[in-house]
């Protein structure tokens, strides 16, 4: 089943979801302006839901489109749940 992202913060481009004890977040970054600063694009990350560890950036971030970042999160979920 594909992850279903929802907007986590109304005034910023941050989307989140969780599944199987894992939390996934997609943020939009740009070099200037409001929000997160960095290379322009969508950055995807994950972390265990019930731990206080920092997030792990998914390889190839930033992505050009939200759909690419979302697909990367779904692939990472399959990989992580297959290992358990």
Image (cartoon, helix red, strand yellow):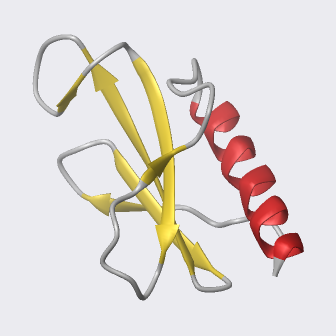
The part of the image, by quadrant, that contains residue 7 is: bottom left
Query: On the picture, is 84 further left or further right than 24?
Result: right
58 sits left or right of 1 in the view:
left
Q: In terms of image quadrants, where is residue 78?
A: bottom right
Residue 40: where, in percent of width, then height? Answer: 38, 14
Q: Is residue 25 above or below residue 47?
A: above
Rendered-image quadrant of the N terminus: bottom right
Residue 46 lies, in percent from the top left, at 51, 59
Q: Relative to 13, say whether 49 is above or below.
A: below
Say above or below: 16 vs 13: below
Q: Quadrant of the C terminus?
A: bottom right
Report how many numbered discs are placed on residues in the image.
0
- Where residue 57 appears, x then y in whole percent? 48, 43
Position of residue 64 measured from the top left corner of the image (x, y, whole percent): 57, 18
Q: What residue do we see at 75% from left, 55% from top? A: 74
Q: Is residue 27 above or below residue 16?
A: above
Residue 18 is drawn in which quadrant? bottom right
Question: Residue sitting at 21 percent across and 11 percent down?
Answer: 31
For residue 82, side relative to residue 76 (left or right) = right
């Amino acid at each position: 089943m594909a992850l279903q992202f929802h907007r986590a913060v109304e005034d910023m481009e941050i989307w989140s979801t969780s599944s199987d004890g894992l939390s996934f977040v997609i943020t939009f970054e740009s070099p200037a302006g409001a929000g997160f600063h960095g290379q322009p694009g969508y950055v995807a990350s994950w972390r265990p839901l019930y731990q206080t560890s920092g997030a792990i950036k998914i390889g190839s971030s930033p992505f050009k489109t939200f759909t690419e970042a979302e697909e990367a999160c779904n692939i990472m979920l399959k990989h992580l749940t297959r290992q358990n």
